[in-house]
Image (cartoon, rainbow, N blue to C red):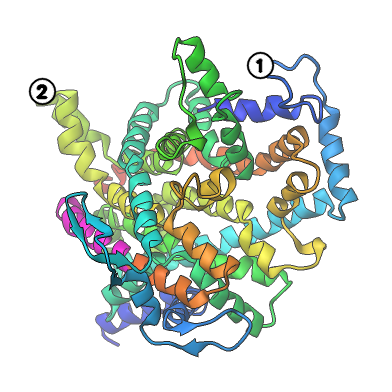
Amino acid sequence: MVVPFYWMIATSLREPGAAFATASIEWLPTKLYWSNYAEAVSRMAADGMSFWRLYGNSLLVAAAGTFGQVLTSSMAAYAFARLRFPGREGIFFGYLATMMIPGSVTLVPVFAVVRALGWVDTYYALVIPGVFSPWGTFLLRQFFMSLPRELEESARIDGASLTQIYLRVTLPLAKTALATLATFTFMGFWGSFMWPLIVTVTPELRTLPIGLTVFTQRYSTDYSLLMAASVMATVPVIVVFLFNQRYFIESIKLQGIKG
Amino acid sequence: MTDRRREALTAYVFLLPNLVGFVVFTAGPVAASLYLAFTRWDLFRPARWVGLQNFVSLLGFSRSSDDSTSILGLWRVPYVANDPFFWQYLYNTAFLMLAIPFTLFGSLLLALALNRKLRGVVVYRTLYFLPSITAGVAVLVLWKWLYNTDLGLINSVLTQMGVARPPDWLGSSSWSKPALMLMGFVMGVGGASMILYLAALQGVPRELYEAAQLDGASGRQQFASITWPLIAPTTFFLGIMSVIGGFQGGFMQAYIMTAGGPAGSTMTLEYYIFNKAFVVFNMGYASAIAWVLFVIILVVSLATWKYGGRSVQYH
């Protein structure tokens, strides 16, 4: 399980161009080519794409998208899970059903919408459509539904409004699920390749995965540089994971029911 | 304003931002794709309405002069499928999905093991989570190399263990799918599913276990009557998402590692759709395939819901 990741790092430090020339597996490269990392950045620049610009773009898009998704999904999920209103089950089923359509065929219609809004080649196109993916709402609704009602009910008795319950009771209890959603949404935006490729044209707006293809196109795949760039690209995801990770340790304190 | 009315109003306010975006960017395009399934569109010239023609070409059977199709290898019938590729790829897609229950179960085991305040548990969780964040083009290229028949790591190890002729993984139509399934399992275990299970396990009140222990329940009994039912909503979620994802999956792997081969043995329906839409530019046909796939997914999901709904308990 860890082997591929270790392999990535080991390969990134090998002599450029020689990565797979030998028949035997080199577990520990004899000489560490740290220069590969700088070389990867400059190789990309030579192709007209600034590694750091793309990095920043990916960060911006992923952060904004994650924020939007978590915010709107949690609100919608709360409505689906705890509030009663006409059409609730029907609309939720609609959410579920749309996830069953393979993404490839909605790609063109979504592009048409984005184009009609004048958002092609803008950050809006990179961020907004992804924010409204239904899976976040689905995830959070399930989680909200599994929370014990007693806390919410006692808050109700204490006179709290539904919004207050949402903010003070439900959300704090759901930290784990929210952290999980945030992590995966971030990962989704971070690794998104096809969509940014379609909606952006100018190199300054493109995201990191597109930049990585530089290494696989002309020069018969230079694995060392590709791995170097990939390792650098993995850092934010690890950071996000570690940050959210602590919420997985906290256990939901149910002493509140008795207290 | 009545309480009910106020509740419904609050609900709509909470729902609105997400719902608007959903309609514009998800539901709308989905409806558009349904329309497209009844047209012939090459993305350049205007779409032309062709009614059910796409579906007939996809699912239909025509009379043929000889007994060219066999049903389950037992009976031969004088019909030939209009689109034999569809059925082959459907089989591929379903076959590849067989790894899913194993992956989910493996993730659950991992989550159970890591659901403790051990020293260094953070390290373990990160380690097991790593494969899923390194997923992507680089990793697939890596696995392609690992599976290399002559020089790859897997076969090298097998040879050293004494296997005379290790399989030609990605080059053989019998081994290509198992190869992808194995990769899917190794990379899939411990990722998203593990994290979600961890989150769900955190939500199980400790008092229940303590009470059960006092009553003399064994570990296995505790798992069966406490853990499993209480994490059922998560299992349900993961199950549905896996079904949806599984039917729609296999694209990147096939695209990067095998180009759908050999002999179409790793071609999945999603890849087929992509091919029809963006390579051959027959968007209408691609949409038709997508909607047939949708019906399949819907039926399987409803079956899962019916079955899972009984064991899902919300308290």
Q: Does residue B156 sit above or below B13 in this rendering?
A: above
Specify the amino acid type for callout 2: Gly
First to last magenta residue range = B295-315
Mark 2 nearby-residue class (10 Å; few <14, some 14–19, many ≥20): few
Most common secondary structure along the magenta stretch: helix
Q: Residue at x 31, y 77 (%)?
A: B7
Task: Tell whether A75 sits left or right of B223.
Answer: right
Q: Find out whether residue B310 is within the magenta segment.
A: yes
> Label 1 is placed on what type of residue?
Ser
As drawn, A91 above or below A82 = below
Q: A24 or A41, which lies in front? A: A24
Residue A99 locus on image (x, y percent)? 40, 65
Q: In this orientation, which residue lies closer to the viewer: A180 or B282? A: B282
Q: In percent of the image, x 32 and y 55: which residue is there?
A: B240
Say which mark, if any, is on residue B175.
none
Q: Quadrant of residue B164?
A: top left
Q: Residue furthest front?
A: B65
Residue B216 numbered mark, or none: 2
The correct choice, above or below, for B48 with respect to B265 in the image is below
Name the residue located 71 percent from the left edge and 35 percent from the top edge.
A227
Residue B73, position as x, y percentages in the image: 21, 49
Q: Chain of mark 1?
A: A
Asked if residue B274 lies left or right of residue B193, the reply is right
In front of the other: B81 or A212: B81
Residue at which label 1 appears: A24
- Residue B273 in the image: state x and y as whole percent: 48, 64
Q: Which image quarter: residue B84?
A: bottom left
